């Protein structure tokens, strides 16, 4: 595995007997009765934790959960997460009742080799998101070695992702972080062509920077989702009641002009699946010129699926962000799942999925293990592929 910018992999760190702080992303969904709804973020960091347990490190885990905004919110305690983690590892996980302070210090001080403690929700303290130096120093005082395995928060300059790192002598990337950096940096380097980006989702405004950055690298872009509606409207199509960003038509037109100047092909839907609303029973596919005034475009249509499938199949590099339709409803999931399967079936290409909803769609389509990489970070992966510096990664690389 190639880690750029002089970042050290956790496997290369001497951790035996050391106190190792690991920033993990245990921001899992909780059920109403406060149990872990989906434990995939917990299972994702097990390789790093097991590696450290096996080497007799004294492990201090830090994570945020939800948005307590610097206040103690008991309903956002990491307690259910600690319980699930203990179950998965079949070992004790001590939960400190605060992110920092005398209690946390005691818990860390009592750790024996191979033992594990979890600090309480870091965002219970305002110093976490404020990247306050006193809080960062406190966290740093709990460890000899710093490991970041929380790619999903790497685009935030917080105390546990950036501030504390300069106060710890030895630092490195965990397995999750290292794989993200490895695969996503390949998209910024010499890639095999054609390079296709598939972009969709809710809004042009959310993604215009990503689109602009992709324009510099890709050979073609296939657009779906509500984002496509805005592009099509910019081209003068009538899309009835479809979700369209009326104030982004000039942005869309400008983008299409830049793409044509750069000889980047932009595929837009030539047919769509329409309905009266997202809960309507009745749906049908119509040509893009035939959307009735009282209907909404909620997925790409079968002819467009064929075009996009063909483009994915011919590509040797594919980056996908943003669903092709309202995939949360099975009636409008066809386009999104077809793109997911086409990526999985292309065994010759580097296939990367980024974005929270897109990652969920690939899992729902049952092909997550057949694409090269499903990024665990929504916003972080989008910032990375734009070539932006992520504070959490820059901190690991700093001398
Ligand atoms: P990601 O999280 O992968 O970056 P986004 O958050 O940008 O993706 O977009 C996902 C959302 O876009 C989904 O909730 C989906 O329902 C919505 N969406 C996709 N297509 C349409 C459409 N045609 N009309 C309305 N909403 C759509
Ligand atoms: Mg989303």
Image (spheres, grey):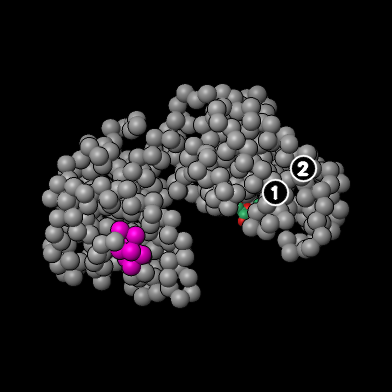
The C terminus sits in image quarter: top left
The residue indicated by pointer 1 is: 334
Q: Are marks 1 and 2 in contact (CB under 8 Å)?
A: yes
Q: Position of residue 163 (x, y in %)?
A: 27, 51
The residue nearer to you, when weighing 123 against 260, is 123
Q: Is residue 116 left or right of residue 370?
A: left
Tell me what residue is drawn at x 79 percent, y 63 percent. Answer: 281
Position of residue 265 in the picture relative to residue 163 (left or right): right
Within the magenta stretch, is there residue 358? Answer: no
Camera-nearest residue between 234 and 330: 330
Residue under circle 2?
302
Q: Position of residue 72 (x, y in %)?
A: 33, 73
Q: Quadrant of residue 212?
A: top right
139 left or right, relative to 288: left
Residue furthest to the front: 90
Q: Which residues are magenta?
A: 81-89
Q: Is residue 122 above or below residue 242?
A: below
Toward which corner of the image does residue 86 lie, by quadrant? Answer: bottom left
Please give the name of the residue rendered at 39% of the width and 35% of the height, measured from the top-left corner.
182
The relative height of residue 18 versus residue 74 in the rendered view (above or below) is above
């Amino acid at each position: 595995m190639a880690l750029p910018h002089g970042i050290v992999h956790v496997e290369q760190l001497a951790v035996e007997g050391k106190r190792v702080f690991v920033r993990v992303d245990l921001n899992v969904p909780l059920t109403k009765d406060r149990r872990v709804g989906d434990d995939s973020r917990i299972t994702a960091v097990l390789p790093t934790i097991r590696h450290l347990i096996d080497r007799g490190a004294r492990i201090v885990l830090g994570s945020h959960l939800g948005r307590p905004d610097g206040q103690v919110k008991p309903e956002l305690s990491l307690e259910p997460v600690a319980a699930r983690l203990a179950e998965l590892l079949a070992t004790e996980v001590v939960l400190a009742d605060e992110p920092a302070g005398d209690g946390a210090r005691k818990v860390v001080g009592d750790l024996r080799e191979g033992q594990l403690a979890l600090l309480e929700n870091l965002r219970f303290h305002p110093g976490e998101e404020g990247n306050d130096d006193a809080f960062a120093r406190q966290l740093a005082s709990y460890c000899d070695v710093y490991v970041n395995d929380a790619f999903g928060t790497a685009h935030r300059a917080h105390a546990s992702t950036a501030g504390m790192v300069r106060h710890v002598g030895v630092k490195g990337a965990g397995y999750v972080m290292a794989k993200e950096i490895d695969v996503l940096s390949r998209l910024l380097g010499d890639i095999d062509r054609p390079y296709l980006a598939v972009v969709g989702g809710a809004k042009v405004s959310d993604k215009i920077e990503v689109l602009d950055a992709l324009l510099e690298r890709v050979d073609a872009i296939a657009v779906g989702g509500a984002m496509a509606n805005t592009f099509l409207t910019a081209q003068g199509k009538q899309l009835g009641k479809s979700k369209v960003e009326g104030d982004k038509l000039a942005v869309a037109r400008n983008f299409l002009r830049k793409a044509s100047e750069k000889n980047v092909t932009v595929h837009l839907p030539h047919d769509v699946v329409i309905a009266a609303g997202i809960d309507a029973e009745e749906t049908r596919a119509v040509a893009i010129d035939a959307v009735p005034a009282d209907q909404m475009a909620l997925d790409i249509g079968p002819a467009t699926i064929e075009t996009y499938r063909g483009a994915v199949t011919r590509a040797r590099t594919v980056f996908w962000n943003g669903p092709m339709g309202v995939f949360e409803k099975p009636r409008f999931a066809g386009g999104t799942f077809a793109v997911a399967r086409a990526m999985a079936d292309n065994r010759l290409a580097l296939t990367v999925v980024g974005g929270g909803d897109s990652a969920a769609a690939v899992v729902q389509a049952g092909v997550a293990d057949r694409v090269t990489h499903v990024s665990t970070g929504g916003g972080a992966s989008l910032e990375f592929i734009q070539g932006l510096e992520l504070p959490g990664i820059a901190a690991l690389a700093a001398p």
